Amino acid sequence: MPRYVLHYRENRHQVEHKIEFQSVCPASVLDVVARKKQGLDADLYEDGRPLCHLTNLGPEEVWLVSRFNGDRRA
């Protein structure tokens, strides 16, 4: 089962967080981040490889999934 790592920063404090989890599907990351705040920007890695960038666009849990653009390492 692949290992996923989600890197994100809290907007107010710019404190970097890392969440690690295993799943059969990368879409499960939406369950992991569903309770996070509006405006969250995160980079998702799969088995150490950059997978995508996620941006929370609003309170309705609308997420923009785009190409990876970060420089953090899993």
Image: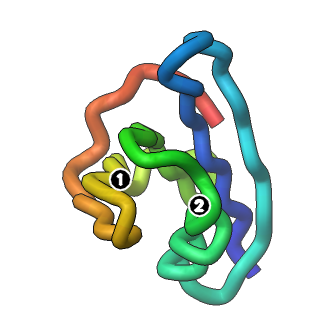
| Disc 1 secondary structure class | strand
Residue 51, percent across and down? 40, 55
| Disc 2 secondary structure class | helix
In the rendering, which numbered label is found on residue 56? 1
Which residue shows up at 61% across the image and 11% down it? 13
Task: Report whether 19 appears left or right of 12.
Answer: right
Residue 63, percent across and down? 31, 64
Residue 53, percent across and down? 34, 47
Which residue shows up at 66% across the image and 15% down it? 15
Q: Earlier in the sequence, mark 2 or mark 1?
A: 2
Task: Report whether 14 appears left or right of 67.
Answer: right
Check disc 2 and give the amino acid type. Val
**Looking at the picture, does residue 56 appear above or below residue 11?**
below
**Looking at the picture, does residue 63 appear above or below residue 69?**
below
* Circles 2 and 1 in contact, beta carbons < 8 Å: yes
Task: Report whether 5 appears left or right of 42.
Answer: right
Check disc 1 and give the amino acid type. Asn
Q: Single out the residue that lies furthest toward the front.
A: 59
Judging by the rendered image, the residue that carries numbered circle 2 is: 33
Task: Report whether 54 appears left or right of 57.
Answer: right
